[in-house]
Image: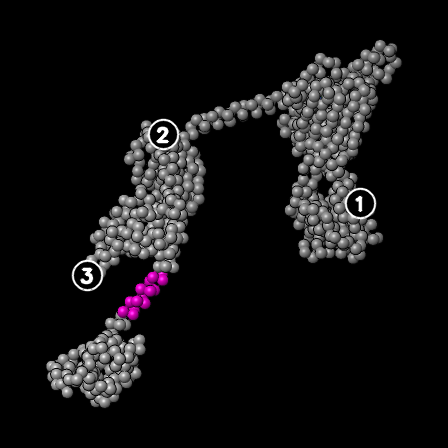
Amino acid sequence: MNDDLRGAALPRVLIEYGSDVFWRTGPELCLEYVSPNVTRFLGYSPAEMLGRPVTDFVEWEHDQQVPATLDEGSVTLRGIAVCRDGSRRWFENHVLPMRAGDGSVVGFTGVFHDIDRQVRAERDLADSEHRYRMLAEHASEVVVQGGVDGVIDWVSPSVREALGLDPADVVGRPVVDLIHPDDHQAVRDAQAVLATGRESHFEARFLRADGSPLWNSVLVRPICDEAGTIVGRIASWRDIDREHRQREALRESEEHFRLLAINASDVVVQTANDGTVQWLSPSIEDILGYRIDDLLGRHVVELVHPDDIGLVVAAQRAALEGEPARFEARYRKADGEHTWMSVVGRPLFDDSGTVVGRVASARRVDDERAAAEALARATEAAQAANLAKTQFLSRMSHELRTPLNAVLGFAQLLGMDDLTDDQRAAVEQILRGGRHLLDLINEVLDIARIESGRVTLSPEPVMAADVVSEALELVRPLASQRDVTIAWEGPRGCERALFVDRQRTIQVLLNLLANAIKYNRDGGRVEVRCSGAGEQCEIAVSDTGIGIAAEDLPKVFEPFERLAAGSSGVEGNGIGLPLSRGLAELMGGGIGVESTPGVGSTFTVALPFATVAAAPALGVDVLAGPAVQSDTRRVLYVEDNPANAELMTAILSRRPGVAMEVAPRGDEALASIRSDAPDLVLLDLHLPDTTGEEVLRGLRSDPSTSDVPVVVLTADAAPHVRRRLLALGADAFLSKPVDVARLLAWIDDPQQSRRSS
Ligand code: ADP
């Protein structure tokens, strides 16, 4: 055995304490020597290992066959040593065969070098590289790795989605190729920072495959080797296109508003929460005569007229609470004069919604205020003059009526005496002229009353058919004198009740009909048609008369305007149409006219339907009612006004299963209910013989009728009346114009309505 190969021949300290383990085997790989420091690595003492084959203590990597390999000469093998405690350690073995003089292998010697830490570190590094690469490849951001020359070595696949480019086409290209020329400077600046070893952040437009730009935020870091030399760079790009555009739009709009504020003729002022001026538009110099610098940092209240300070302070307080404010106040100009300004102030919020101040725009309104004051004075004067005219007309009419009464009275007395034909003709002339004058005076009085707002109307539900028929009856004699035929198609389209003053409506219709006959030709024709137009009924009166020229149409509603009729011999005074229009408007409607000269005219009066308030809220479903009604229900309506009863009949015509009876008097109602109680009583409060309240009291005090459902229907909706009636035992209190939906609910199921009311 060669002594050189014995451990003893090596310096002891190296063998026992070095990091390499020395060993020697026979030809069969059984250990003959192993240096003592083996214990530090494998846990075995040399004694435990000697005589045993090396293979007991190692697992070769990749099935390396030691003897076969060793035949070739010295070799380095990497493997895993099995420690005494069963753990494994990576090692490297430098093995040298020992040969006899004839060249045959007589054993092996070698050095066992522990590389466990190194191998594990290498593995960890590979793992983490793998992980980062996975992250880069799957991130939505684009990750790019390149050299110091800016050429791309590697790019994450997300570049395909981000820019529409194939990663393979990107690799090998300088990164500036992908960036908009206008942003190359940003890249160069970043490179300068990178050269100092620091990271850099910038924004630039990257070019997509189709050449369109896309804003990206770029973070780029240098890559250094162990010696700290920069060997490349790694960057990540994030798409901020939308964000960038929003920022740009915001910046542009801020710029726009800043320019507006600077160039505004109004004064724009920004104040802090304490009221001190922070910013002012240059227009302050023209409007109040101050220089901007004179006012910055001062309190706005210093400029306000002492009497108006309260308004400004209130507006500032509103701003602190996040509320806008609008007011007019006097501000002191640099020359000491005051000027009226109209101010609109709004709070200023920061991103968190906290009020940080106020922006106000103020406009000089001296001229407007002067004009408004002048207008108010003129209007007041005009109103006073109008009132004086109206009062004069009204007094005059009264004054004229008194002597006229005497004229007419005495003329009638005279007509009863025996008179000659000439005398009788003269008396008739006096009577005709007198009556005409009386009509005229009454109409002038009416016009005066309308203008002074002193006409009192008594609107009630009225059926169009009734008023039209009544007016037609009155004009028939006039029509037959002229041989004019009258056609009336009935109230088609206006079957619902109107809510109008009955007498005044007849007066309006009479006037239109009389004109249609007066200004007709002999043997002509007058036609009356109705049609529903939304919430109004339109009654049109057409004639085949002389017509009115287009330019004269607006004049026909001016008082005392008679147009050509003044010289035609047709009697009239030019008051009928203005009066009719005034009345129709007072009732919530109006009058319009269309005419063709030589062909005829059509005057149309529009009047409101009675259920104006309730009708629009009604769905078809409500009116359609319950699908199946088994029994006929009886409803007793205690009401003396026929029009109201007619309206109720129209409403209940929607309910085939309901039979309605009407009791116009309280005593009749009580008797009827006592003899045969209906399913529901609808009770009006104003009855000819008693009050609805008394009827209710009578019903509730009688055990046979105390439980009959009673719904009060009245125009008197005063809260105390309502409370009293409900306390007396009314089941519901519906005010007029009636809410048809609620009424139908009671009619459909009184018991259910009673439970849910
Ligand atoms: P009056 O009939 O008493 O003159 P109105 O005020 O009723 O006064 O009408 C004003 C004017 O309008 C009439 O004088 C007449 O010139 C014109 N007018 C009114 N109705 C008609 C009509 N149906 N056809 C032609 N002209 C008419």
Residue tagged 1: 662
SS class, disc 2:
helix
Query: In which quadrant is the C terminus drawn?
Result: bottom right
Q: Position of residue 738 (x, y in %)?
A: 69, 44
Mark 1, Cα crowd under 10 Å, few <14 / some 14-19 / many 20+, is many
Disc nearest the viewer among 2 and 3: 3
Identify the residue under disc 3. Answer: 227
Q: Quadrant of residue 146?
A: bottom left
Nearer to us: label 1 or label 3: 3
Dot 1 or dot 2, earlier in sequence: 2
Give the Cα distance between marks 1 and 2: 75 Å
Q: Position of residue 16 (x, y in %)?
A: 16, 82
The residue at the point 26 percent across, 47 percent down is 188
Magenta stretch: includes residue 657: no
Give whichever of 154, 688 is nearer the camera: 154
Q: Which residues are magenta?
A: 122-135
Write down the residue under mark 2.
Answer: 287
From where the camera sits, is residue 551 visible?
yes
In this rendered view, identify the residue nearer to me: 85 or 198.
85
Q: Position of residue 503 (x, y in %)?
A: 74, 31
Please tell me whether residue 512 is drawn above or below residue 692 in the rendered image: above
Residue sitting nearer the eye, 117 or 638: 117
Measured as percent of width and height from the top left, residue 714 is found at: 71, 44
Q: Is residue 197 left or right of residue 342?
A: left
Residue type highlighted by circle 2 = Ile
Secondary structure beneath dot 3 equals loop
Q: Quick one: label 1 or label 3, which is nearer the N terminus?
A: 3
Left/right placement of residue 587 relative to residue 374 reads right
Amino acid bearing label 1: Val
Q: CA distance from mark 1 to mark 3?
A: 112 Å
